[in-house]
Amino acid sequence: MRHNLLSIIFFSLSALALTGLSSCSPHKSLMREDLVDMPAAYSEASEKTGHYNGRWWEQFNDAELNSLISESLINNPNITQAIERLIQSQSLILSAEAARGVSANIDGSAGRSRQNILSRPITKNTYSLSTAAGYEIDAWGKLKSRSVAAGFDADASREELHSLLISISAQITDLYFLAAEQQAQLALSDQTIASFEDTLQRVERRYRAGLVPALDLYQSRQNLSSAQAQRPLYVQGRQQALNAISVLTGNFPSAGTMELANIPQDAPVIKQGIPSELLVDRPDIKAAFARIQAADKRVASAVADKMPSFKLMGTYGRSGDHAILDSPNIFWNILLQAAMPVIDSGRRSAEVSRTESRLRELLAAYRGKVLTAYQEVEDAGSRITASEDRIIHLKNRVLSAENSHRLALDRYTQGLTDYLPVLTAQLSFFNAKSSLLTESRNLVSGRIQLARALGGRWPEEAAEQITMDRGRTQ
Protein backbone atom coordinates (compact mmCIF):
# COMPACT_ATOMS: atom_id res chain seq x y z
CA MET A 1 0.00 0.00 0.00
CA ARG A 2 2.81 2.34 0.91
CA HIS A 3 4.75 1.77 -2.29
CA ASN A 4 1.59 2.41 -4.37
CA LEU A 5 1.13 5.71 -2.56
CA LEU A 6 4.78 6.58 -3.19
CA SER A 7 4.41 5.89 -6.90
CA ILE A 8 1.31 8.08 -7.14
CA ILE A 9 3.04 10.99 -5.38
CA PHE A 10 6.20 10.66 -7.47
CA PHE A 11 4.53 10.53 -10.86
CA SER A 12 2.00 13.24 -9.97
CA LEU A 13 4.84 15.61 -9.15
CA SER A 14 6.52 14.63 -12.41
CA ALA A 15 3.41 15.36 -14.46
CA LEU A 16 2.92 18.68 -12.67
CA ALA A 17 6.48 19.72 -13.45
CA LEU A 18 6.19 18.59 -17.04
CA THR A 19 2.98 20.47 -17.80
CA GLY A 20 3.61 23.56 -15.71
CA LEU A 21 7.16 24.68 -15.14
CA SER A 22 8.56 23.43 -18.46
CA SER A 23 6.64 26.09 -20.33
CA CYS A 24 8.94 28.76 -18.93
CA SER A 25 11.90 29.74 -21.12
CA PRO A 26 14.22 32.76 -20.93
CA HIS A 27 14.87 32.62 -24.74
CA LYS A 28 12.68 33.92 -27.56
CA SER A 29 12.66 31.79 -30.73
CA LEU A 30 13.56 33.18 -34.15
CA MET A 31 10.80 33.57 -36.74
CA ARG A 32 11.20 32.64 -40.39
CA GLU A 33 9.96 35.94 -41.77
CA ASP A 34 12.88 37.69 -40.05
CA LEU A 35 15.49 36.02 -42.25
CA VAL A 36 15.35 37.28 -45.85
CA ASP A 37 13.25 39.46 -48.15
CA MET A 38 12.77 37.87 -51.57
CA PRO A 39 12.37 39.90 -54.81
CA ALA A 40 8.90 39.95 -56.29
CA ALA A 41 9.98 38.46 -59.64
CA TYR A 42 12.96 37.22 -61.62
CA SER A 43 14.62 39.73 -63.92
CA GLU A 44 15.26 37.27 -66.75
CA ALA A 45 11.70 36.15 -67.49
CA SER A 46 9.30 37.49 -64.91
CA GLU A 47 6.21 36.62 -66.99
CA LYS A 48 6.87 32.89 -66.61
CA THR A 49 4.94 31.80 -63.53
CA GLY A 50 3.46 28.60 -62.20
CA HIS A 51 6.36 26.22 -62.76
CA TYR A 52 5.97 22.44 -62.97
CA ASN A 53 6.51 20.90 -59.53
CA GLY A 54 6.38 17.18 -60.25
CA ARG A 55 8.69 14.61 -61.83
CA TRP A 56 9.74 16.98 -64.59
CA TRP A 57 11.90 14.48 -66.50
CA GLU A 58 8.81 12.44 -67.35
CA GLN A 59 7.83 15.24 -69.73
CA PHE A 60 10.58 14.01 -72.07
CA ASN A 61 8.44 10.88 -72.62
CA ASP A 62 11.52 8.64 -72.64
CA ALA A 63 11.03 5.21 -71.04
CA GLU A 64 14.77 4.52 -70.85
CA LEU A 65 15.41 7.78 -69.00
CA ASN A 66 12.54 7.13 -66.58
CA SER A 67 13.93 3.65 -65.88
CA LEU A 68 17.45 4.97 -65.22
CA ILE A 69 16.23 7.55 -62.72
CA SER A 70 14.03 5.02 -60.93
CA GLU A 71 17.01 2.67 -60.68
CA SER A 72 19.27 5.43 -59.34
CA LEU A 73 16.79 6.37 -56.61
CA ILE A 74 16.98 2.78 -55.35
CA ASN A 75 20.63 1.82 -55.88
CA ASN A 76 22.67 5.03 -55.68
CA PRO A 77 25.20 4.73 -52.80
CA ASN A 78 24.96 8.42 -51.92
CA ILE A 79 21.20 8.07 -51.43
CA THR A 80 21.81 5.08 -49.17
CA GLN A 81 24.22 7.17 -47.09
CA ALA A 82 21.69 10.02 -46.85
CA ILE A 83 18.98 7.61 -45.68
CA GLU A 84 21.28 6.21 -42.99
CA ARG A 85 22.12 9.74 -41.84
CA LEU A 86 18.40 10.42 -41.57
CA ILE A 87 17.94 7.28 -39.47
CA GLN A 88 20.80 8.38 -37.20
CA SER A 89 19.27 11.81 -36.72
CA GLN A 90 15.89 10.26 -35.91
CA SER A 91 17.57 8.07 -33.30
CA LEU A 92 19.03 11.20 -31.71
CA ILE A 93 15.47 12.50 -31.28
CA LEU A 94 14.62 9.43 -29.19
CA SER A 95 17.81 9.90 -27.18
CA ALA A 96 16.99 13.55 -26.48
CA GLU A 97 13.38 12.70 -25.59
CA ALA A 98 14.58 10.02 -23.17
CA ALA A 99 16.39 12.67 -21.12
CA ARG A 100 13.01 14.31 -20.43
CA GLY A 101 11.46 11.16 -19.02
CA VAL A 102 11.70 9.26 -15.76
CA SER A 103 14.73 7.04 -15.28
CA ALA A 104 14.51 3.97 -13.03
CA ASN A 105 16.94 1.26 -11.94
CA ILE A 106 16.46 -1.98 -10.05
CA ASP A 107 19.25 -2.80 -7.60
CA GLY A 108 19.65 -6.12 -5.90
CA SER A 109 22.24 -7.64 -3.59
CA ALA A 110 22.82 -10.90 -1.76
CA GLY A 111 25.49 -11.68 0.83
CA ARG A 112 26.61 -14.18 3.44
CA SER A 113 28.57 -13.21 6.55
CA ARG A 114 29.96 -14.88 9.67
CA GLN A 115 30.87 -13.30 12.99
CA ASN A 116 31.39 -14.33 16.61
CA ILE A 117 28.81 -13.20 19.09
CA LEU A 118 29.49 -14.16 22.71
CA SER A 119 32.19 -16.55 21.48
CA ARG A 120 29.68 -18.29 19.30
CA PRO A 121 30.08 -18.22 15.46
CA ILE A 122 26.94 -17.07 13.71
CA THR A 123 26.47 -17.32 9.93
CA LYS A 124 23.92 -14.97 8.36
CA ASN A 125 22.44 -14.41 4.87
CA THR A 126 21.32 -10.93 3.77
CA TYR A 127 19.22 -9.91 0.77
CA SER A 128 18.17 -6.55 -0.59
CA LEU A 129 16.02 -5.49 -3.56
CA SER A 130 15.17 -1.86 -4.37
CA THR A 131 13.98 0.41 -7.15
CA ALA A 132 15.42 3.92 -7.61
CA ALA A 133 13.77 6.47 -9.91
CA GLY A 134 14.74 10.00 -10.92
CA TYR A 135 13.23 12.81 -12.91
CA GLU A 136 14.67 16.21 -13.84
CA ILE A 137 12.02 18.93 -13.79
CA ASP A 138 12.54 20.91 -16.99
CA ALA A 139 11.66 24.21 -15.36
CA TRP A 140 13.27 26.42 -18.01
CA GLY A 141 12.82 24.28 -21.11
CA LYS A 142 16.46 23.17 -21.34
CA LEU A 143 15.71 19.52 -22.08
CA LYS A 144 12.76 20.37 -24.30
CA SER A 145 14.94 22.72 -26.35
CA ARG A 146 17.51 19.97 -26.87
CA SER A 147 14.79 17.58 -27.95
CA VAL A 148 13.27 20.09 -30.37
CA ALA A 149 16.74 20.86 -31.75
CA ALA A 150 17.24 17.15 -32.47
CA GLY A 151 13.92 17.16 -34.30
CA PHE A 152 15.00 20.08 -36.47
CA ASP A 153 18.28 18.29 -37.21
CA ALA A 154 16.27 15.31 -38.41
CA ASP A 155 14.17 17.64 -40.58
CA ALA A 156 17.38 19.01 -42.09
CA SER A 157 18.66 15.50 -42.81
CA ARG A 158 15.37 14.68 -44.49
CA GLU A 159 15.54 17.78 -46.68
CA GLU A 160 19.16 17.02 -47.55
CA LEU A 161 17.97 13.62 -48.77
CA HIS A 162 15.33 15.36 -50.89
CA SER A 163 17.98 17.71 -52.28
CA LEU A 164 20.15 14.74 -53.20
CA LEU A 165 17.25 13.11 -55.07
CA ILE A 166 16.82 16.28 -57.13
CA SER A 167 20.56 16.50 -57.82
CA ILE A 168 20.92 12.88 -58.94
CA SER A 169 17.82 12.95 -61.15
CA ALA A 170 19.15 16.12 -62.83
CA GLN A 171 22.64 14.64 -63.25
CA ILE A 172 21.33 11.48 -64.89
CA THR A 173 19.04 13.41 -67.22
CA ASP A 174 21.86 15.74 -68.24
CA LEU A 175 24.27 12.84 -68.78
CA TYR A 176 21.66 10.91 -70.73
CA PHE A 177 21.20 13.71 -73.25
CA LEU A 178 24.95 14.37 -73.29
CA ALA A 179 25.40 10.74 -74.34
CA ALA A 180 22.63 11.24 -76.91
CA GLU A 181 24.42 14.30 -78.27
CA GLN A 182 27.73 12.43 -78.49
CA GLN A 183 25.89 9.63 -80.30
CA ALA A 184 24.46 12.17 -82.75
CA GLN A 185 27.88 13.78 -83.17
CA LEU A 186 29.31 10.32 -83.89
CA ALA A 187 26.69 9.73 -86.58
CA LEU A 188 27.44 13.17 -88.05
CA SER A 189 31.16 12.33 -87.93
CA ASP A 190 30.49 9.17 -89.94
CA GLN A 191 28.53 11.23 -92.47
CA THR A 192 31.38 13.73 -92.63
CA ILE A 193 33.95 10.99 -93.19
CA ALA A 194 31.80 9.44 -95.90
CA SER A 195 31.40 12.84 -97.59
CA PHE A 196 35.13 13.56 -97.41
CA GLU A 197 35.91 10.10 -98.82
CA ASP A 198 33.57 10.78 -101.72
CA THR A 199 35.20 14.17 -102.32
CA LEU A 200 38.66 12.61 -102.13
CA GLN A 201 37.71 10.10 -104.80
CA ARG A 202 36.54 12.91 -107.08
CA VAL A 203 39.75 14.87 -106.49
CA GLU A 204 41.86 11.79 -107.17
CA ARG A 205 40.09 11.20 -110.47
CA ARG A 206 40.62 14.78 -111.53
CA TYR A 207 44.23 14.67 -110.34
CA ARG A 208 44.96 11.54 -112.38
CA ALA A 209 43.38 13.26 -115.36
CA GLY A 210 45.73 16.19 -114.84
CA LEU A 211 42.89 18.62 -114.17
CA VAL A 212 43.87 19.70 -110.61
CA PRO A 213 47.19 20.20 -108.83
CA ALA A 214 48.60 17.89 -106.16
CA LEU A 215 47.74 20.52 -103.54
CA ASP A 216 44.05 19.75 -103.96
CA LEU A 217 44.74 16.08 -103.36
CA TYR A 218 46.74 16.74 -100.20
CA GLN A 219 44.12 19.13 -98.82
CA SER A 220 41.37 16.60 -99.45
CA ARG A 221 43.33 13.87 -97.68
CA GLN A 222 43.99 16.27 -94.82
CA ASN A 223 40.25 16.95 -94.42
CA LEU A 224 39.50 13.24 -94.32
CA SER A 225 42.23 12.56 -91.74
CA SER A 226 40.98 15.42 -89.54
CA ALA A 227 37.43 14.04 -89.60
CA GLN A 228 38.68 10.53 -88.85
CA ALA A 229 40.75 11.84 -85.92
CA GLN A 230 37.68 13.57 -84.46
CA ARG A 231 35.57 10.41 -84.42
CA PRO A 232 37.27 8.68 -81.42
CA LEU A 233 36.59 11.76 -79.28
CA TYR A 234 32.85 11.31 -79.74
CA VAL A 235 33.14 7.59 -78.96
CA GLN A 236 35.02 8.50 -75.79
CA GLY A 237 32.55 11.23 -74.83
CA ARG A 238 29.58 8.89 -75.23
CA GLN A 239 31.24 6.13 -73.20
CA GLN A 240 32.24 8.48 -70.38
CA ALA A 241 28.67 9.76 -70.11
CA LEU A 242 27.35 6.18 -70.01
CA ASN A 243 29.97 5.25 -67.40
CA ALA A 244 28.85 8.14 -65.20
CA ILE A 245 25.22 7.04 -65.57
CA SER A 246 26.17 3.50 -64.54
CA VAL A 247 27.84 4.74 -61.35
CA LEU A 248 24.90 6.99 -60.48
CA THR A 249 22.55 4.01 -60.85
CA GLY A 250 24.77 1.95 -58.54
CA ASN A 251 26.35 -0.23 -61.24
CA PHE A 252 29.86 -0.83 -62.51
CA PRO A 253 30.58 0.77 -65.90
CA SER A 254 30.59 -1.69 -68.78
CA ALA A 255 31.31 -1.62 -72.49
CA GLY A 256 27.68 -2.28 -73.32
CA THR A 257 25.56 0.15 -75.26
CA MET A 258 22.29 1.83 -74.34
CA GLU A 259 19.27 2.68 -76.43
CA LEU A 260 19.61 6.45 -76.58
CA ALA A 261 16.92 8.83 -77.71
CA ASN A 262 17.48 11.72 -80.06
CA ILE A 263 18.04 15.16 -78.59
CA PRO A 264 14.54 16.62 -78.10
CA GLN A 265 13.77 19.42 -80.52
CA ASP A 266 10.88 20.55 -78.32
CA ALA A 267 12.23 20.05 -74.81
CA PRO A 268 9.58 20.60 -72.11
CA VAL A 269 9.26 24.16 -70.89
CA ILE A 270 9.72 24.47 -67.13
CA LYS A 271 8.50 27.86 -66.00
CA GLN A 272 10.30 29.79 -63.32
CA GLY A 273 7.49 30.72 -60.98
CA ILE A 274 8.18 33.47 -58.44
CA PRO A 275 11.27 33.80 -56.20
CA SER A 276 9.44 33.27 -52.91
CA GLU A 277 8.58 29.72 -54.02
CA LEU A 278 12.25 28.82 -53.67
CA LEU A 279 11.90 28.98 -49.88
CA VAL A 280 9.38 26.12 -49.92
CA ASP A 281 10.46 24.22 -53.04
CA ARG A 282 14.26 24.09 -52.59
CA PRO A 283 15.09 21.30 -50.11
CA ASP A 284 18.58 22.66 -49.48
CA ILE A 285 17.08 26.00 -48.39
CA LYS A 286 14.58 24.20 -46.18
CA ALA A 287 17.43 22.15 -44.70
CA ALA A 288 19.40 25.33 -43.99
CA PHE A 289 16.37 26.83 -42.23
CA ALA A 290 15.93 23.67 -40.15
CA ARG A 291 19.59 23.94 -39.09
CA ILE A 292 18.92 27.52 -38.01
CA GLN A 293 15.93 26.40 -35.96
CA ALA A 294 18.03 23.68 -34.34
CA ALA A 295 20.81 26.16 -33.52
CA ASP A 296 18.21 28.58 -32.15
CA LYS A 297 16.92 25.90 -29.77
CA ARG A 298 20.47 25.11 -28.68
CA VAL A 299 20.91 28.75 -27.74
CA ALA A 300 17.76 28.43 -25.63
CA SER A 301 19.13 25.28 -24.00
CA ALA A 302 22.47 26.97 -23.24
CA VAL A 303 20.68 29.96 -21.70
CA ALA A 304 18.44 27.67 -19.63
CA ASP A 305 21.49 25.76 -18.38
CA LYS A 306 22.49 28.90 -16.45
CA MET A 307 19.24 28.73 -14.44
CA PRO A 308 18.56 26.61 -11.32
CA SER A 309 17.88 22.91 -11.85
CA PHE A 310 15.41 20.67 -9.99
CA LYS A 311 15.50 16.89 -9.70
CA LEU A 312 12.95 14.59 -8.14
CA MET A 313 14.33 11.27 -6.83
CA GLY A 314 12.78 8.35 -5.01
CA THR A 315 13.72 4.88 -3.73
CA TYR A 316 11.64 1.93 -2.63
CA GLY A 317 12.85 -1.52 -1.55
CA ARG A 318 12.91 -4.45 0.84
CA SER A 319 15.69 -6.18 2.75
CA GLY A 320 15.95 -9.21 4.96
CA ASP A 321 17.63 -12.53 5.60
CA HIS A 322 15.04 -14.74 3.84
CA ALA A 323 12.03 -14.58 1.47
CA ILE A 324 12.77 -11.02 0.45
CA LEU A 325 9.43 -10.43 -1.28
CA ASP A 326 7.63 -11.25 1.96
CA SER A 327 10.05 -9.35 4.19
CA PRO A 328 8.51 -6.72 6.49
CA ASN A 329 11.70 -4.63 6.24
CA ILE A 330 10.52 -2.00 3.75
CA PHE A 331 12.49 1.16 3.11
CA TRP A 332 11.69 4.16 0.88
CA ASN A 333 12.54 7.81 0.45
CA ILE A 334 11.61 10.71 -1.81
CA LEU A 335 13.82 13.74 -2.41
CA LEU A 336 13.51 17.03 -4.27
CA GLN A 337 16.97 18.36 -5.12
CA ALA A 338 17.63 21.94 -6.29
CA ALA A 339 20.94 23.27 -7.62
CA MET A 340 21.96 26.77 -8.61
CA PRO A 341 25.12 27.38 -10.70
CA VAL A 342 27.32 29.83 -8.81
CA ILE A 343 30.91 29.43 -10.04
CA ASP A 344 31.77 27.51 -13.21
CA SER A 345 34.72 29.62 -14.41
CA GLY A 346 32.60 31.00 -17.26
CA ARG A 347 31.81 27.62 -18.86
CA ARG A 348 28.07 28.19 -19.27
CA SER A 349 28.50 31.75 -20.53
CA ALA A 350 31.05 30.53 -23.06
CA GLU A 351 28.59 27.90 -24.26
CA VAL A 352 25.90 30.56 -24.71
CA SER A 353 28.37 32.67 -26.70
CA ARG A 354 29.35 29.68 -28.83
CA THR A 355 25.77 28.69 -29.67
CA GLU A 356 24.84 32.28 -30.48
CA SER A 357 27.83 32.56 -32.82
CA ARG A 358 26.85 29.27 -34.46
CA LEU A 359 23.34 30.63 -34.98
CA ARG A 360 24.68 33.80 -36.62
CA GLU A 361 26.92 31.67 -38.84
CA LEU A 362 23.94 29.60 -40.02
CA LEU A 363 21.89 32.75 -40.62
CA ALA A 364 24.61 34.05 -42.93
CA ALA A 365 24.85 30.65 -44.62
CA TYR A 366 21.07 30.63 -45.14
CA ARG A 367 21.11 34.03 -46.82
CA GLY A 368 24.02 32.91 -48.99
CA LYS A 369 22.14 29.77 -50.01
CA VAL A 370 19.04 31.79 -50.92
CA LEU A 371 21.14 34.19 -53.00
CA THR A 372 22.84 31.27 -54.76
CA ALA A 373 19.49 29.62 -55.49
CA TYR A 374 18.15 32.86 -56.95
CA GLN A 375 21.30 33.21 -59.08
CA GLU A 376 20.96 29.62 -60.33
CA VAL A 377 17.42 30.28 -61.53
CA GLU A 378 18.49 33.51 -63.23
CA ASP A 379 21.49 31.80 -64.84
CA ALA A 380 19.34 28.95 -66.11
CA GLY A 381 16.79 31.38 -67.55
CA SER A 382 19.55 33.36 -69.26
CA ARG A 383 21.08 30.17 -70.64
CA ILE A 384 17.75 29.00 -72.03
CA THR A 385 17.07 32.36 -73.71
CA ALA A 386 20.54 32.44 -75.26
CA SER A 387 20.25 28.83 -76.51
CA GLU A 388 16.84 29.48 -78.07
CA ASP A 389 18.22 32.50 -79.93
CA ARG A 390 21.36 30.65 -81.05
CA ILE A 391 19.37 27.69 -82.36
CA ILE A 392 17.36 29.96 -84.66
CA HIS A 393 20.54 31.40 -86.16
CA LEU A 394 22.30 28.04 -86.34
CA LYS A 395 19.41 26.50 -88.27
CA ASN A 396 19.72 29.31 -90.81
CA ARG A 397 23.47 28.77 -90.88
CA VAL A 398 23.08 25.04 -91.56
CA LEU A 399 20.68 25.72 -94.44
CA SER A 400 22.98 28.32 -95.99
CA ALA A 401 26.08 26.16 -95.49
CA GLU A 402 24.38 23.18 -97.11
CA ASN A 403 23.47 25.20 -100.20
CA SER A 404 26.96 26.71 -100.35
CA HIS A 405 28.58 23.28 -100.08
CA ARG A 406 26.46 21.80 -102.85
CA LEU A 407 27.10 24.76 -105.15
CA ALA A 408 30.87 24.83 -104.49
CA LEU A 409 31.19 21.09 -105.17
CA ASP A 410 29.25 21.37 -108.43
CA ARG A 411 31.40 24.27 -109.62
CA TYR A 412 34.58 22.41 -108.68
CA THR A 413 33.47 19.27 -110.50
CA GLN A 414 32.75 21.37 -113.59
CA GLY A 415 36.22 22.91 -113.36
CA LEU A 416 34.94 26.42 -112.71
CA THR A 417 36.76 26.94 -109.35
CA ASP A 418 39.68 25.52 -107.45
CA TYR A 419 39.40 23.28 -104.37
CA LEU A 420 39.56 25.99 -101.67
CA PRO A 421 35.85 27.01 -101.91
CA VAL A 422 34.90 23.32 -101.62
CA LEU A 423 37.12 22.91 -98.58
CA THR A 424 35.69 26.01 -96.91
CA ALA A 425 32.05 25.16 -97.69
CA GLN A 426 32.43 21.54 -96.65
CA LEU A 427 33.97 22.37 -93.28
CA SER A 428 31.46 25.15 -92.68
CA PHE A 429 28.50 22.84 -93.39
CA PHE A 430 29.52 20.06 -91.01
CA ASN A 431 30.70 22.48 -88.33
CA ALA A 432 27.33 24.22 -88.49
CA LYS A 433 25.49 20.92 -88.06
CA SER A 434 27.77 19.98 -85.17
CA SER A 435 27.19 23.36 -83.49
CA LEU A 436 23.43 22.93 -83.89
CA LEU A 437 23.58 19.53 -82.16
CA THR A 438 25.63 20.99 -79.31
CA GLU A 439 23.32 23.97 -78.87
CA SER A 440 20.22 21.76 -78.97
CA ARG A 441 21.69 19.77 -76.11
CA ASN A 442 22.62 23.01 -74.33
CA LEU A 443 18.98 24.05 -74.47
CA VAL A 444 17.94 20.76 -72.88
CA SER A 445 20.68 21.16 -70.25
CA GLY A 446 19.48 24.69 -69.53
CA ARG A 447 15.99 23.41 -68.82
CA ILE A 448 17.38 20.63 -66.68
CA GLN A 449 19.43 23.24 -64.83
CA LEU A 450 16.28 25.30 -64.29
CA ALA A 451 14.35 22.31 -62.98
CA ARG A 452 17.18 21.55 -60.57
CA ALA A 453 17.43 25.20 -59.47
CA LEU A 454 13.69 25.42 -58.77
CA GLY A 455 13.64 22.28 -56.65
CA GLY A 456 10.21 20.77 -56.23
CA ARG A 457 8.13 18.73 -53.83
CA TRP A 458 8.20 15.38 -55.63
CA PRO A 459 11.22 14.16 -53.59
CA GLU A 460 9.06 14.06 -50.45
CA GLU A 461 6.90 11.30 -51.86
CA ALA A 462 9.87 9.59 -53.51
CA ALA A 463 11.93 9.56 -50.31
CA GLU A 464 9.04 8.14 -48.32
CA GLN A 465 8.58 5.35 -50.84
CA ILE A 466 12.31 4.61 -50.93
CA THR A 467 12.59 4.36 -47.14
CA MET A 468 9.50 2.12 -47.01
CA ASP A 469 10.93 -0.18 -49.67
CA ARG A 470 14.28 -0.38 -47.90
CA GLY A 471 12.53 -1.12 -44.63
CA ARG A 472 10.72 -4.06 -46.19
CA THR A 473 13.96 -5.51 -47.57
CA GLN A 474 15.90 -5.31 -44.28
Image: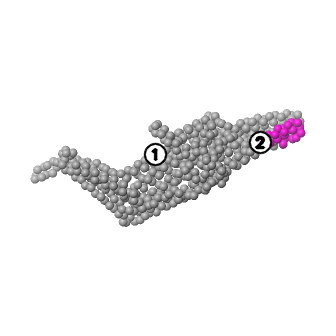
**Looking at the image, can residue 244 be seen?**
no
**Looking at the image, can residue 334 be seen?**
yes
Give the residue number, with chain letter if any, for mark 2. 398
Q: Residue at x 43, y 47 (%)?
A: 91
**Residue 388 within the magenta-colored segment of the rendering:** no
- Residue 297 appears in which quarter of the rendering? bottom left
Image spot of residue 81 (x, y percent): 50, 45
Give the structural element (helix, strand or loop) at label 2. Answer: helix
Q: Residue at x 63, y 39 (%)?
A: 60
Q: Between residue 382 and residue 82, name the one nearer to us.
A: 382
Is 437 left, or right, of 79 in this rendering? right
Give the residue number, with chain letter if any, for mark 1. 87
Give the structural element (helix, strand or loop) at label 1. Answer: helix
Above or below, 126 relative to 71: below
The amino acid on which the numbered mark 1 sits, given as a three-letter code, is: Ile
Rounded to the nearest angstrom, the CA distance separating label 1 from label 2 is 55 Å
Above or below, 258 relative to 11: above
Magenta span main SS: helix
- Magenta region: 400-422
Looking at the image, is mark 1 or mark 2 earlier in the sequence? 1
Q: Which mark is residue 415?
A: none
Image spot of residue 24 (x, y percent): 39, 59
**Dot 2, how many residues are within 10 Å of its Cα: few (below 14), some (14-19), or many (20+)?**
many
Q: Residue at x 54, y 40 (%)?
A: 73
Is 154 left, or right, of 322 in this rendering? right
Image spot of residue 285 (x, y percent): 55, 52
Image spot of residue 422 (x, y percent): 83, 40
**Residue 405 within the magenta-colored segment of the rendering:** yes
Q: Between residue 29 and residue 305, name the one nearer to us.
A: 29
Question: Quadrant of the image for the C terminus?
Answer: top left
